[in-house]
Image (spheres, helix red, strand yellow):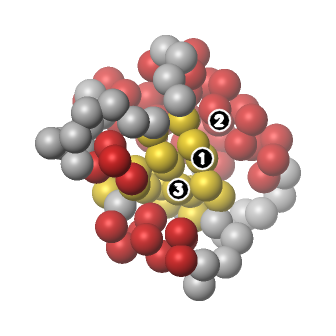
């Protein structure tokens, strides 16, 4: 995984502050320690679907405040039968 312990802590802490429950996964190129560069791909699975757009904006803003301005793609759970969600869960790293 190509995130520092401080970045992981900031992401997990912000996730709990905003979403309160659920699971968060890192997926994509940042899961491979042999690669370089790439954005931070995060997948959030939560049962609480209230105000998801607002929560997404808050989450991204707070994480960037904590870890600096990095490209972060945030995927929120809609339908776990979607291929992208299955890939995030199966190949991603649960934080």
First reached walking from the N terminus: tag 3 or tag 1: 3
Residue at 39% across / 53% down in the picture? 28
Q: Are marks 3 and 1 in contact (CB under 8 Å)?
A: yes
In the displayed structure image, the side of residue 49 where residue 95 appears, left or right: left
Task: Locate residue 90: give its quadrant.
Answer: bottom left
Residue 86 percent coordinates (x, y): 48, 76
Q: Which mark, residue 16?
A: none
| Residue to which mark 3 is pinned | 43
Element type at mark 3: strand
Residue at 50% across / 23% down in the picture? 70
Q: Are marks 1 and 2 in contact (CB under 8 Å)?
A: yes
| Residue to which mark 1 is pinned | 74
Residue 38 percent coordinates (x, y): 39, 36
Give the alpha-carbon distance from disc 3 to disc 1, as whole Å. 6 Å
**Crowdedness of circle 3 by 10 Å Cα count: few (<14), some, many (20+)?**
many
Give the alpha-carbon distance from disc 2 to disc 3, as whole Å. 12 Å
Q: Confirm whether residue 11 shows in the render.
A: yes
Residue 90 in the image: above or below residue 4: below
Task: Locate residue 12: give its quadrant.
Answer: top left
Residue 23 percent coordinates (x, y): 49, 60
**Residue most extreme to the bottom:** 81
The quadrant in which the N terminus is found is: top left
In the displayed structure image, the side of residue 88 where residue 5 appears, left or right: left
**Crowdedness of circle 1 by 10 Å Cα count: few (<14), some, many (20+)?**
some
Residue 67 in the image: above or below residue 17: above
Q: Which mark, residue 59?
A: 2
């Amino acid at each position: 995984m190509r995130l520092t312990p401080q970045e992981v802590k900031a992401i997990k802490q912000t996730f709990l502050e905003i979403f309160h429950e659920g699971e968060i996964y890192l997926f994509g190129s940042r899961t491979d320690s042999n690669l370089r560069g790439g954005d931070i791909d995060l997948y959030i699975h939560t049962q609480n679907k209230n105000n998801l757009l607002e929560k997404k904006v808050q989450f991204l803003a707070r994480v960037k405040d904590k870890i600096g301005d990095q490209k972060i793609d945030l995927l929120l759970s809609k339908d776990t039968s979607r291929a992208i969600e299955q890939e995030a869960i199966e190949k991603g790293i649960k934080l």
